[in-house]
Amino acid sequence: MAHPFRMQEATSIALHSMVKIAQAHPEPQQVAVLASEIGVSRNHLAKVLQRLHKAGLVKSKRGPKGGVTLAKEPQQINLLEIYEAIEGKFSPNACLLNKKDCPFKKCIMGNLVGEIGRMFGEFFASYSLADFKSKNNGR
C-alpha cells in the first residue's frame, strides 16, 4: 500500500531508539537490547546511533556497565533534532520536484505540500523526548 508520508528507515529507527533511551534515562541502554525491542538489526541501529552521537544527541560508554545514554536531558531534545540528525536540515519545501519555479502556471498540488511540510516541522518541534518518558507515551 502506498504511503503519502515517507521517511528513511534510519530516521524511524533514530526516533524509536531515542524514545526508548529517554524512557530509561539516565540508565545506559545496550545496543543489542534496543535493537531487539525496536525490531531492527543491531548493525543498522549501531550506524544510526553513530549519527546521533555525531549530532551530540547521545553518548556511549564501552564495557559491561556501558551502553547508550542521552547526551542532554529529555526535555532538551525534540523530535525535529533527531529527524535532522539523520535526514539533514528540515525545509518545508512546497515543491515535490524541488524546483524554484513551477513548470505550470499553478501548482497541481496547490498549497498541500507546503502546508503538510509546515505542519510536520511544527509537530516534530513541539514534542521533546520528555513527552515520551512514560512508557504510555501520553502527552
Image (cartoon, rainbow, N blue to C red):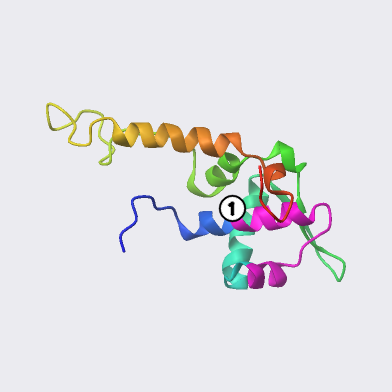
Residue 39 included in the magenta stretch of the image: no
Which residue sits furthest right? 65
From the top left corner, tell me how far across and down residue 55 is, in percent: 63, 45
User: Which image quarter holds the N terminus?
Assistant: bottom left
Residue 35 included in the magenta stretch of the image: yes
Tell me, yes or no, if residue 29 can be seen here: yes
Residues 121 and 132: in front is: 132
Residues 136 and 121: in front is: 136
Residues drawn in magenta: 15-37
Residue at image position (17%, 36%) is 108
User: Which image quarter holds the C terminus?
Assistant: top right
Q: Residue 115 sits in which quadrant?
A: top left
Q: Is residue 31 above or below residue 127?
A: below
Q: Main secondary structure of the magenta part?
A: helix
Residue at image position (72%, 43%) is 130
Q: Is residue 75 left or right of residue 114?
A: right
Q: Residue 135 sits in which quadrant?
A: bottom right
Q: Is residue 136 left or right of residue 124?
A: right
Residue at image position (49%, 35%) is 121
Badge 1 crowding class, 10 Å Cα cut-off, few under 14, some 14 to 19, many 20 or more, is some
Identified by mark 1, the residue type is Leu
From the top left corner, tell me how far across and down residue 53 is, in percent: 67, 51
**Residue named by callout 1:** 15
Number of marks drawn: 1
